[in-house]
Image: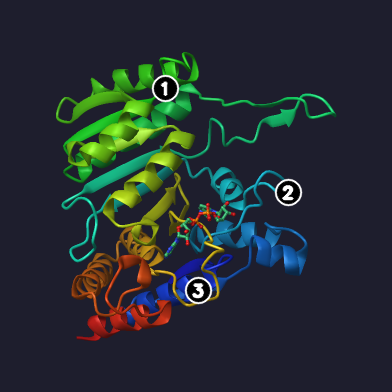
Amino acid sequence: MHRVVLIPGDGIGPSISEVAVHVIDAAGVKIEWIPVEAGMAAIDKYKDPLPQHVIDEISSTRLALKGPLTTPVGSGFRSVNVALRKEFDLYSNLRPARSFEGVPSRYTNIDLLIVRENTEEFYAGIEHYIDPQRSAAETIGVVTRSGSDRIIRYAYEYARSHGRKKVTTVHKANILKYTGGLFLEVARTIAQEYPDIASDDKIVDNMAMQMVVNPNQFDVIVTTNLFGDILSDLASGLVGGLGLAPGGNIGYDAAIFEAVHGSAPDIAGKNIANPTAIILAGVMMLRHLKEEDAANRIERAVEEVIKEGKAVTADLKPAKPVGTKEMGEAIIDKLRV
Ligand code: NAD
């Protein structure tokens, strides 16, 4: 029996998380789910977006499946997502983007993995207004040699152990000569230790253009925190949208799996959100737990439902869309076959 903390999340979070739990349970994996609230739901209940008992539960299980959490824009409390990554030193954010047969999208056969540094740089929370009149503000992005070393090494080790052929380091070292320069210097040094993996590096603006024009030239992409966040949304757009993009936040001894997307307030409460991203985050979690068989069966069930196109949500542009719950039921039906 595995023990997993479940954070349902805000906005569309509770509805897609519920579907993910049903799908994982239907695959026959024995999981004791420990539901806790964080984000807006916790503010309403505990006046704290990240109550201590949530941290205590994850400290005990070292594993969580998390729905998206709303972060107020431009003011208010700091991101609970970022706080959790810092608290458990989840330094590696894995964000795969792959094509699904049956999804109308610009490209086919895309299979990219973004490895995003998850604890440093502009997400470290070192920022302030310089005076009470708020005439200027500054955010300090700290990049360390050790932080760069561990994430770049993670990307190469992942590439080697998963049969990937190439690692592309993305940076802005032409302008950010120190932070970007340090990251790139470490990447070029580590690349020499992996002669079996092709290596290259790209400036982030060129990278964005290259990904849109010819994404199949890339394989594993490793980059700093902010660029990784932006490029992973871009990558999801190449394969059919955020509804299909899962992610894992991995540390030395803890991990939190979640969708790449946010709480989608524009579609919350309407039973129209695509549950695929969080289900696939669950698949990543099962692989982390070495539950390969269940992970493969769920992945195949999702692929079949999407390919048939009869029981998918509106974002995948079917002739007749179904709701979040109904798509989940169709996936569970495939598991039972
Ligand atoms: P978003 O990812 O929530 O939504 C962007 C667009 O994608 C919206 O049009 C939305 O309807 C659509 N979308 C997202 N998920 C979808 C799904 N499963 N099915 C169908 N369509 C989907 O981004 P946003 O609107 O910029 O952010 C909303 C909130 O989410 C903010 O408070 C932000 O801070 C937070 N956020 C949280 C996380 C996280 O919890 N890891 C990640 C990103 C954003």
Q: Earlier in the sequence, mark 1 or mark 3?
A: 3
Residue nearest the viewer, comparing 277 with 6: 277
* Residue denoted by label 3: 33
Rendered residue at 26%/45% (across/down): 112
Quarter holding the N terminus?
bottom left
On the image, the x and y values in percent for residue 333 come to 27, 85
Residue at far front of view = 319
Could you give the CA–CA distance between mark 1 and mark 3, rounded to whole angstroms? 42 Å
Rendered residue at 36%/71% (across/down): 314
On the image, the x and y values in percent for residue 8 come to 54, 69
Report helix, strand or loop for mark 2. Answer: loop
Q: Which mark is residue 328?
A: none
Select label 2 or label 3 by which is in front: 2
The three-letter amino acid code for the residue at tag 1 is: Lys
Report helix, strand or loop for mark 3. Answer: strand
Report helix, strand or loop for mark 1. Answer: loop
Q: Is residue 330 visible?
A: yes
Q: Are marks 2 and 1 in contact (CB under 8 Å)?
A: no
The three-letter amino acid code for the residue at tag 3 is: Trp
From the viewer's perspective, is 73 left or right of 331? right
Rendered residue at 22%/51% (across/down): 106
Q: Earlier in the sequence, mark 2 or mark 3?
A: 3
Task: Judge the density around disc 2: few (<14), some (14-19), many (≥20) Cα neighbours within 10 Å.
Answer: few
* Residue denoted by label 2: 76
| Res 245 → quadrant | bottom left
From the viewer's perspective, is 318 left or right of 49? left
On the image, the x and y values in percent for residue 131 come to 82, 25
* Residue denoted by label 1: 172
